[in-house]
Image: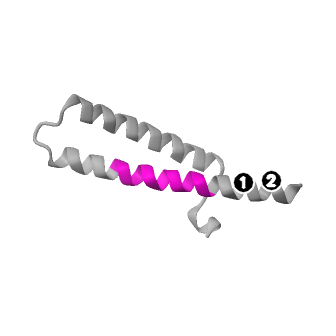
Amino acid sequence: MFRKKQKLRKFEDAQLLKYLEEQKKKLDSEKQLIKRSIDPSEDVLNQLKVTEAVYSFLLRKARERYIQKNELL
């Protein structure tokens, strides 16, 4: 019973790290887009704020669960 919970927790931790990496890449690309833009639109700036909020949320959850990349490898 405990092994099943441990296995499920490892799977969820791996998924969380995967989503965290995806959001980080998306955030970096959006920041680069805005940096290269002369006059970014409000939609682009709002999308950046949403992406930053999602990334911040995922990062906070990873910290709460004490997840580290090298533990899952």
Marks 1/2: CA–CA distance: 6 Å
Q: Is residue 64 within the magenta segment?
A: no
Q: Which residue is mark 1?
A: 9
In this rendering, the answer to whether 40 lies above or below 21 is: above
SS class, disc 1: helix
- Give coordinates of residue 68: x percent, y percent: 59, 60
Instruction: Out of 56 and 6, give the one closest to the viewer.
Output: 6
**What is the magenta segment's predominant secondary structure?**
helix
Q: What crowding class fits label 1: few (fewer than 14 Cα within 10 Å), some (14-19), or many (20 or more)?
A: few
Q: Residue furthest right?
A: 1
Q: Amino acid at mark 2?
A: Lys
**Residues at discs 1 and 2 in contact (Cβ within 8 Å):** yes
Q: Residue furthest left?
A: 38
* Residue at 25% over, 31% down: 43
Q: Residue furthest top?
A: 42
Q: What crowding class fits label 2: few (fewer than 14 Cα within 10 Å), some (14-19), or many (20 or more)?
A: few
Q: Amino acid at mark 1?
A: Arg
- Give coordinates of residue 13: x percent, y percent: 64, 54
Q: Which quadrant is home to the N terminus?
A: bottom right
Q: Which contiguous range is marked in magenta? A: 14-27
Q: Which mark is residue 5?
A: 2
SS class, disc 2: helix
Asked whether the viewer can see residue 18, the reply is yes
In this rendering, the answer to whether 57 lies above or below 42 is: below
- Give coordinates of residue 38: x percent, y percent: 10, 41
Q: Which quadrant is home to the C terminus?
A: bottom right
Asked whether the viewer can see residue 66, the reply is no
Q: Is residue 16 within the magenta segment?
A: yes
* Residue at 69% over, 58% down: 10
